[in-house]
Each structure stands twice: as C-alpha cells, then as structure tokens.
Amino acid sequence: MQNQSLEEAIQYAKKYLEDLLSFFGLNIEVYATAEDDVIELSVPSTHMNGFLIGQRGETIRSIQFLTSMSLRSKDFEHCRVNVDIADYKKNRQDRVAEKAEEWIQRVKDTNTTFALKPMNAADRRVVHKVAAEYGLTTHSEGEGRERHIVIEPPTTAEPESSEAA
C-alpha cells in the first residue's frame, strides 16, 4: 500500500537524513519543508560542511539519492528530495544565475547563438529559467555528462527560410 501523506514523507525523510548524519557523529536537526511536491531538507552549517558537500557537490547528490531511494523503498508517493547543506545549493544557484546573466548579455550583444560548457541538471534548470525571464530561448543538447545548454539570440521577424535564398 502506498503512503500518500506528504507530511509523513517529510517526517520520514527528515528522520532518515538525521539518522544518516548521526553515523558521521553529527547530531543536528534537519529543517524539512515541501515545495511543489519536492521535499526540501536543509542541513545547517557545521564543521563537516566540506565533507558532506563533497567535490562539486557530489556527496550532497549521493545523500539526496539515498534519501529519495529510501522513501521509494517505503512506498511513499512523494519521493522527490532536495538536500542542501549550509545553503551550498542556494548559493550555487545564485552564482549560476549571475553567470547566466553575463552569457545572456553576450548573446544579446553579439546576436549569435552561445553553447555553454556541460553542466548538471540543477544548473541547467537555473540557466533556462533566467534566460526565459530575459525572453530568450534555450535548449539542452548532448547526453549524460556532456549535456549542455545552447542560448539562442532574440528572434527576429524574418522567417528562417530566408537564409536558404
């Protein structure tokens, strides 16, 4: 039988993450909320931030995956989880958004397409959102670790077929 309550899923995920952190000798309270059916788990800043975040956030993603899989194994309907440690992801999103604004300005100034370096899904989501706010079109290309965003210049009134003429 599937566990339906979002509140139950939040409490289970919170307890699971607190228990996982206690294996590393870290007995702290995890802050848990939900936004758009995604369980948001926030671990406050501690002396173990670097260890828990890992290189380029790899450990955070692993902790997030474990928490999500635990929810799924207990048949919770809500198993999408976002784990943030010491606001690492929030700060990263802010930095990526600032960079995206620079890339968008470059595309507007040169009126040419700009392909970004490969980035993870969370960073791509931020770039797509910022570009949409500026009225530009973006799309992702590539597979796996090579997946990257292409930012298109503002569209003109000319039909595309005019280039072939």
Image (cartoon, rainbow, N blue to C red):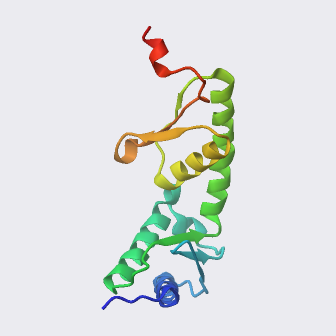
* Residue located 32% across and 82% down the image: 73
Vertical placement of 120 versus 118: above or below? below
Please name whichever residue, 163 or 5, is drawn nearer the observer in this view of the structure.
163
* Residue located 62% across and 55% down the image: 92
Vertical placement of 163 versus 93: above or below? above
Q: Which residue appears farthest toward the top when viewing the image?
A: 165
Please name whichever residue, 145 or 3, is drawn nearer the observer in this view of the structure.
3
Q: Position of residue 98 (x, y in %)?
A: 69, 45
Where is the C terminus found, in terms of image quarters? top left
* Residue located 47% across and 51% down the image: 120
Q: Position of residue 60 (x, y in %)?
A: 49, 66
Count the marks: 0
Where is the N terminus found, in terms of image quarters? bottom left
* Residue located 55% across and 38% down the image: 137
Residue 43 lies left or right of residue 145; in this view the side is right
Please name whichever residue, 80 or 155, is drawn nearer the observer in this view of the structure.
155
Residue 33 lies left or right of residue 122; in this view the side is right
Q: Position of residue 91 (x, y in %)?
A: 66, 58
Residue 116 lies left or right of residue 106; in this view the side is left
Q: Position of residue 108 (x, y in %)?
A: 67, 28
